[in-house]
Image (spheres, rainbow, N blue to C red):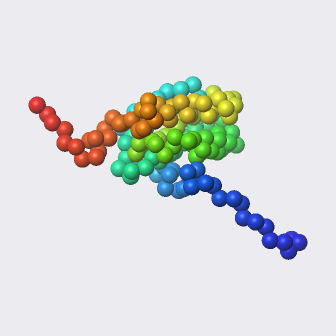
Amino acid sequence: MDGRATAPPPAAPDGERFTRDDRLRRRADFLRCYRQGRRRGGSLATLFYVPNALLRPRFGISASRKVGGAVVRQRLKRRMREIYRRWKQRGRLPSVDLVFNLKPAAAAAGFDDLRREVERQLGSLLDADGGPRETPGARREAGAVRQVS
């Protein structure tokens, strides 16, 4: 060391922060998305989503060994997190748990191709005016009673 102080890295703007609370971390949360949630297919990834009661979206990524080795899977996960973190419409998402399940074709795809597909799938959760679309089951979880006749 030459004794000079180094400046800390610049902080991300408030709208682009991706904190620990923004991520899915528990296996049970991933399984709930797979079992109870809806899905949107794509050529590079499948999006699973299910409403949550946390008043904010949470994001998770899964990639099996079919996608590639550990280095490839981790590179794809970093790309996915960065795409989600920088997506301008992220603040308009409804309260859902999101899981992107990467497909083997994602390993050969470029960053721009992956970004386009992820943004298209996330955009499908928004209304035409850019607001959150009511996800199936959201009213039921919010406490609405279902009438049976």
Q: Residue furthest front?
A: 129
The image quadrant that residue 80 belongs to is top right
Point out the image quarter for the N terminus. Answer: bottom right
The image quadrant that residue 77 belongs to is top right
The residue located at (35%, 36%) in the rendering is: 134
For residue 103, above or below residue 14: above
Q: Position of residue 86 (x, y in %)?
A: 60, 44
Q: Position of residue 4 (x, y in %)?
A: 84, 72
Residue 144 seen in this snapshot: yes
Q: Is residue 63 left or right of residue 34?
A: right
* Foreground of the two, 21 or 24: 21
Q: Position of residue 125 (x, y in %)?
A: 44, 34
Q: Is residue 57 left or right of residue 115?
A: left
* Foreground of the two, 88 or 77: 88
For residue 87, above or below residue 117: below
Point out the image quarter for the C terminus. Answer: top left
Q: Is residue 34 left or right of residue 42?
A: left
Q: Is residue 131 left or right of residue 74?
A: left
For residue 120, above or below residue 86: above
Q: Residue furthest top?
A: 43
The residue located at (51%, 43%) in the rendering is: 90
Q: Residue furthest right?
A: 2
The residue located at (51%, 50%) in the rendering is: 23
The image quadrant that residue 33 belongs to is top left
Q: Residue furthest left?
A: 149
Q: Position of residue 66 (x, y in %)?
A: 61, 33
Q: How many marks?
A: 0
The residue located at (22%, 43%) in the rendering is: 144
